[in-house]
Image: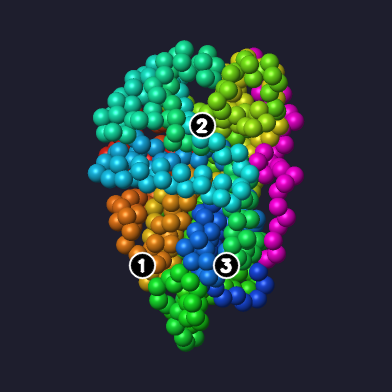
Amino acid sequence: MTDPARALASAAPRPYWLDDPDRPAALPALTGAEEADLLVVGGGYSGLWTALLAKERGPGRDVVLIEAAECGWAASGRNGGFCAASLTHGLGNGLERWPGEIGTLERLGAENLDAIGAAVDRYGIDCDFRRTGEITVATEPYQLDELSEFAEEATRRGLGAGLLLMDRDAVRAEVDSPTFLGGLWDRDGVAMVHPARLAWGLRRACLEAGVRIYEHTPGLALAPAGGGGGGGGALRPTGAPGARGRGGGAMEVRTPYGRVRAPHVALGTNAFPNLVRRVRPYLTPVYDYALMTEPLTAAQRDAVRWHHRQGLADSANQFHYFRITADHRILWGGYDAVHHFGGAVRAEYDQRPETHLKLARHFHRCFPQLADVRFTHRWGGAIDTCSRFAAFFGTAHGGRVAYAAGYTGLGVGASRFGAEVMLDLLAGEHTERTELRMVRGKPLPFPPEPLAWAGIGLTRWSLARADAGGGRRNLWLRALDRMGMGFDS
């Protein structure tokens, strides 16, 4: 058996995607006072899509975006690159939570993925966007039955057109692993992307559209602006006179070296503490980890097949996700979802040797024909998790502030939809999106510490037992199911 420590010996402790010679230079920080029609806080996918779509809706609108570090440096630049159509963290979660509007949610999700592909083409974003789909593989016999039942339910509801149920030989003809017993291929609902280059491409598109972006500019505090004047009305699509906030109707975000005043603010801070404090109990950050291999040789590629470059994930509760890149590397991530006491987010948590060793062992168990493959990068990062696994939305300060958060690992695609929702809410518009129960409702909040830490620990232990026990869920997991709560990566 391959020694996992040896395979990791030369792995750089940084995200592969961000370790790119084409990474753009940082933009200057904000100094002094600025005013705008719309302020966007956060330079990940949520914030970048919001700023870009705001300019598409109204090219004359003055938009400022502030980012605490550099655009795309956090979850948007270090994820697996699975850009899914699903807005609900998978069809199964959507059926459980919003069965009455699942058809609408699936349609809107497909339209959203189409729109991402169209934007990639329109703005010339070089992010290797490929609509290859995703195969969910069964590695235990009971998972075959679950995949079959899921496919039947999707077909019964008219939602199974893009699904292909695969037996052992069929799935191994696509990607060869002795651990694969079968699979379900969603052939059109997932695109694979280079995640950091998608973020950098959106950043460039924002700049070219006239968005003013300030990096290394964290938002420290949010409050109504003082003084007199208007600016508190509906979000104007043209940036016409009077759209900017100069007083009682405006909001103000303070930064280390200045401030920004605007009548409307969109918050895309996700795993980081929300500037609206009452949103914080709905979120807890968990750390996810990944490895990237060296490029496979031609012989190694023949041994594993994978000619169609689909994304893959296994069917366990503690699951792995994996994909092959344009330069023939394999990304292998997932399994552990680590919550730190108090929901802390710190740079030192980006590395976790025990998890990286575990992932290396699991990789070589899945692909024994790649025993000589070594890893070049190892990293981790925080995901904004909520108890219903899918994003939630809302407003604050009389509708002048909007937020979207809680994507729980599926924000690469769904964050664009969240941006549309935030802009609808800020404009006070009643749209098909804002009328969704998913948009109007909230997940259950996490309990305060130490209950959150203890409960998440018990949940992780229970999920591991379920994986080892044929999928049987214990009393704790069944109680969470009845409450509509969960914990996932």
Colour theme: rainbow
**What residue type is disc 1 on?**
Gly
Query: Which callout, 1 or 2, points at the residue further toward the start of the chain?
Result: 2
Q: Which mark is residue 132?
A: 2
Report how far apart the C-alphas of labels 1 and 2 lie in the structure: 37 Å
Magenta-colored span: 1-29
**What residue type is disc 3 on?**
Val
Q: Residue at x 32, y 55 (%)?
A: 432
- Of residues 251 and 123, the one drawn nearer to the viewer in this rendering: 123
Left or right relative to 211: residue 108: left
Q: Which mark is residue 428?
A: 1
Q: Residue at x 49, y 86 (%)?
A: 227
Report how far apart the C-alphas of labels 3 and 2 lie in the structure: 35 Å
Relative image position of residue 441 (x, y in whole percent): 31, 54
Relative image position of residue 407 (x, y in whole percent): 45, 47
Q: Residue at x 52, y 70 (%)?
A: 61
Residue farthest bottom in this picture: 228
Task: Please give the residue where the numbered disc 3 appears in the rendered image.
Answer: 64
**What residue type is disc 2 on?**
Thr
